[in-house]
Image (cartoon, rainbow, N blue to C red):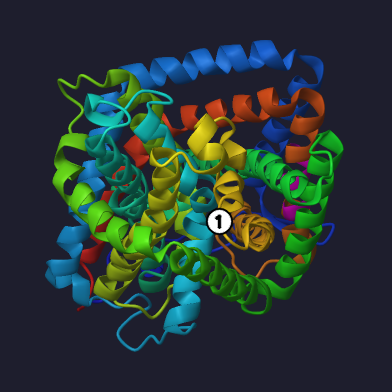
Amino acid sequence: MTKGIDKYSIDSTDYTVGQDNVQKWGFDVHNPVFGISAGLIALFLIGVLVTDTASAKAALDGVKGQIINSFDWLFIWSGNIFVIFCLGLIVSPFGKIRLGGVDATADYSFMSWLSMLFAAGMGIGLMFWSVAEPAAYYTGWFETPLGVEPNTPEAAKLALGATMYHWGLHPWAIYGVVALSLAFFSYNKGLPLSIRSIFYPILGDRAWGWAGHVVDILAVLATLFGLATSLGLGAQQAASGIQHVFGLEAGLGLQVIVITVVTLLAVVSVLRGIDGGVKVISNINMLVAFLLLILVALIGYAVTLGSIPTTLMAYIENIIPLSNPHGREDQAWLHGWTVFYWAWWISWSPFVGMFIARVSKGRTVREFITAVLIVPTTVTIIWMSVFGGMAIDQIVNNIGTLGSEGLTDVSLAMFQMFDALPFGTLLSIIAVVLVLVFFITSSDSGSLVIDSITAGGKVDTPVPQRVFWAFLEGAIAVALLWVGGTEAVQALQAGAISTALPFTIILLLMCVSLLMGMRTEKR
């Protein structure tokens, strides 16, 4: 704490939250950020409507390939730095700092808070990949981690360890850096809840000018396109599940219906706010997820009991070889999986980070990082062991569709695994419900985040504004599916990954800026 004025706080600048905002048509928005973001999105949608999606996808895939091949070392090393940075904060004196000041109290119970972290962070991904990814690594569907021989006991162990590596400490450390930085500068320093605020120690008052505008616009676009991609890909998953269980045709019509229903439910949730909407749905979400986890674990307890220690040991043994980008023999696997994932997590980090910051006031830095890093990693170890272990067991013992045909359709892999289990139809119905509920949480939390950034960091914005963003996410996803189907959605995914490169640099600078801010804080 400096004498007189707290350094890097709102008191040390002439800026006031919302000073660049325009109030019109029931909206309260940051003039340059909202206008430019909305304009770029409109141009993008017009571009999609008039161009051939296959050639757009090819062009974006080319850019994505270049970025992944040229900057693989940057993504991997950045991920390692974020993990070390977060673990360092837990044991450092900065761990005592309380978000919101010494007397701040938590807004949500510990379990509700954890549920919201998890649902926003990676709920839908766990559903999609927990069966498909270990099965892919074991069979060599697209290369194998560390060049291990496919379909061997060693491949089975490494498949679980490598899957865990992609869903464990590293992604949560990426989210944790953004979330902690936002929460600290917003609650402890009184700055607007926006990405630009994090850079106030480095940029000074330039953070409120065009340097800050560019950072916020990048964050809005990355969030919106990341969410639209997830809604598009998720709609295809949900439609595949509905076709598998109920026999309805999983065509474009069903996918559009899924997105429309999810968007309408997300709008209802947005109208109810965090307390009445997001929190309630996240809690339901976790209950249903745990129900599914317990059912599958009990049905296949013989496999499950063995796979949890296997996953944990494989993760610990291989985390360093998997975190080293140099001299790797499995370059194709590294680029196709790990680097792609890291870029994907980084492009998603403004969204997840902002949402976690919104719900984390009152926690100490130590409590915050432990909850954001360690708890989800522990839950994910159990989840991946149960579902991934079961999938590999079915392939090894030639049980069901996975055993006879291997991994054929990624979006159906989980349902194919359930088919070979007792109560398979019931498990599949629960899984479809869970996929849809995870969608709603992603869409409504995403709307709240985009709304906050485009409102100049205000959190108490008019309701029509939040509804506007919820509808826009759904509209983008529907437009993309309508025009170019899977091609268009994957083109967008390639676009989201392209935004990860500048964001990686932004995240590394974030660590520096956060330390500068924390050094001035009373603890």
Q: Amino acid at mark 1?
A: Leu
Front position in the image: 487 or 161: 161
Name the residue located 19 percent from the left edge and 44 percent from the top edge: 319
Name the residue located 30 percent from the left edge and 33 percent from the top edge: 75
Please say if 301 is above or below 443: below
Read off the magenta span.
470-476
Q: Secondary structure at mark 1?
A: loop
Asked if residue 107 lies left or right of residue 506, the reply is right
> Which of the 4 image quarters holds residue 198?
bottom left
Residue 359 appears at what percent x and percent y? 49, 72
Q: Quadrant of the N terminus?
A: bottom left
Asked if residue 388 lies left or right of residue 160, the reply is right
On the image, numbered disc 1 is attached to which residue? 421
Name the residue located 72 percent from the left edge and 52 percent from the top edge: 469
Q: Is residue 1 visible?
A: no
Examine the residues drawn in magenta and state their main secondary structure. helix
Residue 296 appears at what percent x and percent y? 50, 63
> Which of the 4 image quarters holds residue 278?
bottom right
- Neighbourhood count class around disc 1 (C-alpha, 10 Å): few under 14, some 14–19, many 20 upward: some
Residue 199 appears at what percent x and percent y? 36, 50
Asked if residue 474 is among those painted magenta in the image, a careful observer would answer yes
